[in-house]
């Protein structure tokens, strides 16, 4: 059964192309449509991705390239009607309601096509969508591997690497293996407290399947979307995918990490450039990193014989 792929884009087309070429090397026959959502790069990124030679090189895949109205690089928080009711509903302190009203005015109301991954999950005709980041090197037929795992249980909503342990205040007494074996660190799991460094913020939903290489069951995504819960929306104080994960668990959907206990190295490397893609845009604790487009173009040419189009000059 063919799966689709969804991958976000923001000003790093070379890195995205490298990820897709490594996926194509191993999973060309397993994938139908690649849904690329660009967060209004406005710097020539779309010209690179629209290169007809790229579409030819990635045959037989169909490329669907969509540009959002919101500039980003780490995902966008968009207010759904359901989210607005939670933010402005009764029982909240006046100060919180004021902050929420400001949030609504400054961040905008519901624009589903601007939510990361939403276009793919709403329009795909496949049963499963593989979500990828643009800083992943694929090393095996991960699409088929994850699809087969998803097919073992019709209630599996998501498969991928489990755990945001570095962001969780329960990490000292918990681990992904414990969760996968049915253990629960608190009755409120997967709602988990943040570490001390983040305790000034609201309690974070930190435990989840990480989306840099995961597979979503489209039926589960659409069930949650009908209630305004969209994968890719940074909603309710949680990281991308965290609120969605908690909501799916509450509805009786299940999850799996097919990369444990053997590890993900045979299947993918994240991040392959020595730093995460997010580190190009923000300091994640060890300084901002430089995006080396020339190095990536050289590697693409060397490994795949493909000449990646350069962005137009200023």
Image (cartoon, rainbow, N blue to C red):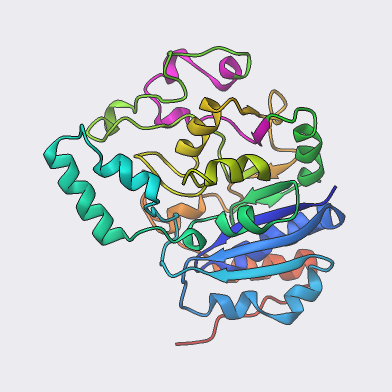
For the point 20% across and 31% down, the residue is 91
For the point 41% across and 56% down, the residue is 76
Residue 138 percent across, percent down from the top left = 72, 49
Magenta stretch in the rendered image: 156-179
In screen coordinates, is 194 left or right of 309?
Answer: left
- Find out whether residue 204 is within the magenta segment: no
Query: Which quadrant holds residue 180?
Result: top right
Front position in the image: 52 or 262:
52
- Find out whether residue 160 is within the magenta segment: yes
Residue 21 percent across, percent down from the top left = 74, 62
Query: Which quadrant holds residue 193?
Result: top left
Front position in the image: 228 or 200:
228
In screen coordinates, is 126 left or right of 115?
Answer: right
In screen coordinates, is 230 left or right of 234?
Answer: right
Front position in the image: 247 or 49:
247
Residue 257 percent across, percent down from the top left = 66, 29
Q: Is residue 269 visible?
A: yes
Q: Is residue 268 above or below residue 59?
A: above
């Amino acid at each position: 059964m063919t799966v689709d792929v969804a991958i976000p884009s923001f000003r790093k087309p070379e890195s995205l192309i490298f990820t897709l070429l490594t996926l194509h090397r191993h999973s060309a026959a397993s994938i139908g449509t690649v849904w690329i959502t660009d967060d209004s790069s406005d710097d020539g990124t779309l010209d690179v991705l629209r290169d007809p030679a790229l579409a030819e090189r990635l045959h037989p895949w169909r490329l669907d390239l969509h540009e959002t109205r919101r500039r980003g690089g780490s995902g966008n928080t968009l207010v759904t009607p359901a989210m607005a009711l939670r933010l402005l509903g009764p029982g909240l302190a006046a100060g919180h309601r004021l902050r929420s009203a400001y949030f609504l005015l400054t961040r905008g109301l519901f624009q589903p096509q601007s939510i990361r991954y939403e276009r793919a999950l709403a329009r795909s005709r496949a049963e499963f969508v593989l979500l990828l980041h643009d800083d992943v090197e694929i090393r095996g037929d991960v699409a088929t591997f994850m699809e087969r795992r998803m097919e073992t249980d019709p209630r599996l909503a998501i498969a991928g690497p489990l755990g945001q342990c570095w962001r969780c205040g329960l990490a000292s007494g918990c681990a992904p293996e414990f969760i996968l074996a049915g253990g629960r660190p608190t009755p409120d799991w997967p709602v988990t407290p943040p570490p001390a460094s983040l305790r000034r913020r609201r309690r974070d939903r930190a435990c989840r399947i990480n989306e840099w290489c995961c597979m979503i069951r489209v039926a589960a995504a659409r069930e949650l979307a009908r209630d305004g819960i969209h994968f890719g929306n940074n909603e309710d104080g949680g990281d991308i995918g965290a609120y969605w994960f908690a909501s799916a668990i509450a509805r009786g959907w299940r999850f799996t990490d097919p990369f444990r206990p053997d590890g993900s190295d045979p299947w993918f490397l994240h991040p392959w450039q020595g730093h995460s893609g997010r580190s190009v845009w923000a300091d994640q604790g060890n300084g901002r990193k430089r995006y080396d487009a020339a190095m990536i173009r050289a590697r693409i040419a060397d490994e795949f014989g493909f000449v990646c189009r350069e962005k137009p000059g200023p």
